[in-house]
Image (spheres, rainbow, N blue to C red):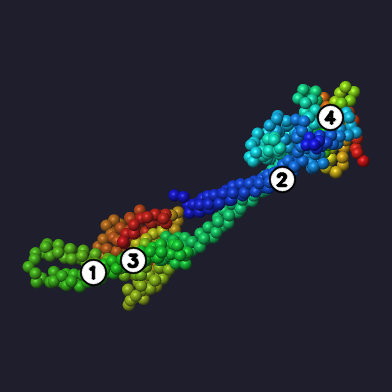
Amino acid sequence: MKTTVPLLAFGLLSLTICAGADDHLDHDKVRQLRKYGQILPMEQLLEQAARLRPGQLIEAELEHRHGGYRYEIKILDADGRVHELELDAATARPLHHEIEP
Amino acid sequence: MISLETRLHLGLALALTAVIGSAWWIGHIALHHSSESVIYSRLEHDAEGLLGSLRSGHGHLHVAARHLTPVYNQPLSGHYFVVEDDQGNRLRSRSLWDEDLDTRALAPGETAAWRAAGPDRQSLLVWAGGYRLDAHLLTLTIAEDVSEFDTEIDFFERLFALLAVCGLALSLVLQRLIVQRAFTSLRPLYRDIERLEHGRAGTLTEQVPPEILPLVRKFNRLLERFGQRLERSRTAAGNLAHALKGPLTLLRQQLAADTLALDAEQRQGLLDQVERLRQIAERQLKRARLAGAGGAALYFEPEEELPVLARLLKRMHAPKQLHIAFDSAIRGPLAVDREDMLELLGNLLDNACKWAEGEVRATLSVNDGELLIRVDDDGPGCAEAALATLTERGLRLDEQVSGHGLGLAIVREIVEGYGGQLTLTHAPLGGLRAEARLTLEHPTSDRAPRSA
């Protein structure tokens, strides 16, 4: 009985983190990929993003797609608009970006 | 010697710098300390909240996501935590993303706080505490980005420093104004010293700040004492000369009378000596009379002195109806000793008055730093040959009118004392013309007054 509560909590947690996006990688995986040099550090990526869309990072997601890693980041600009950018996680090359309504 | 103003400036600048500097330092410390302690206490609260939602099982650490503030999930949000247990498990907040925090292992109940550099040029305040959860030992490290806050404090500190520097500069300017204002109150004193130097005043004004009033009073007392001493010695000399005259006349009379058994040569020798004594006494007496009242080492001011001199001479030659005309284009004081001038002019005019029928004319002018004094009379004048001897030897040409020869000798002495020249010629009025040329000195020259 003692172990069931944390177990249940873990189940809930993994469910919330992974819900609906099976190809989204969690931050521990992100750190691992960066450590192995498979993706660029987030800092470098943000420098690239700031060149495209200056603003504040509000959300980031790393996806594994078509054998590569791509970052989906959301930037809040000074006017209060949210921009979504897609960058290649290994090269920081922009894939495409759009303005969220 | 450093000027008073510089000293005051230095003193104020040092004092203000010390005061403002320490105020700045204390403010800096207090601001950082109090604000950081507020942040640390919030971090501690967050840590306790986090601890409440921590679960451990299957050799893993978990945190119930619904208990977490969203900022801990937002990548590089500036709010981070790391939980480590003694099993080597490590839980990072999602906000750390691909970064990590340096941690320290702490025993339960132990806490620590420090600053660290964070991702994306963030500046972190880190708080860590050691806990015991079930059988596990935990260290919870929680951090917050304070770079914006630092910028704010930095701005305020710069503003404070700027205001302090402005305040310092303003205080110095203000002090300068006050000091200058204080020194302008000394201006009447400067003016009086100048006037004293030019012989136009006898004392200094006592309308001065109380700090220097004792000095001015002392100085005035000294001036007064000098004046009195001069007056006294002058009076004494005059009195002595006057007192000597009687006995000398008696002596002369007795010598002249043939009652004493003396041969002619001895008699003449004694008479000569008595005559010399009489002349000296006469000279002193005249000098004392001419000097009149006046301060020490005053300069000669023709405008003021000449009319007085004329009145005096008219009185001295009382029964004679004399017209004494002065022609002087000189304004203001002359850089010559007053008594020298009075003696010189007095003697020349005295001579002229003695010989004049009724008219004496005196001209004073200054040319290229040379003072020319010309005194004419309408008397009988002098023969050409006699003029030369008179100028050369200048003595005792005249035996009938007393004092003439001696007067000229004194005049010559004074004129030579000024590096000048005395010439005697014929006057257009018919009598004798005496011309004295004197080199004027610079007013500040400290040539000792001859009469002192």
User: Could you classify mark 3 by the number of other residues whose Cα lies within 10 Å: few (under 14), some (14-19), or many (20 or more)?
Assistant: few
The type of residue carrying mark 4 is Leu
Element carrying mark 4: strand
Q: Nearer the viewer, mark 3 or mark 1?
A: 3
Q: Are marks 3 and 4 in contact (CB under 8 Å)?
A: no
Residue B225 numbered mark, or none: 3
Q: Mark 1 points at which residue?
A: B240
User: Could you classify mark 4 by the number of other residues whose Cα lies within 10 Å: few (under 14), some (14-19), or many (20 or more)?
Assistant: some
- Subunit bearing disc 1: B
Point 34% across, 62% down: residue: B340
Q: Name the residue under label 2.
A: B45
Disc 3 from disc 4: Cα separation: 108 Å
Q: Which of marks 2 and 4 is in front?
A: 2
Of callouts 3 and 1, which one flags the residue occurring earlier in the amino acid sequence? 3
Point 72% across, 35% down: residue: B83
Element carrying mark 2: helix
Element carrying mark 1: helix
Q: Position of residue B241 (x, y in %)?
A: 24, 68
Residue in front for this viewpoint, B183 or B161: B161
Disc 1 from disc 2: Cα separation: 110 Å
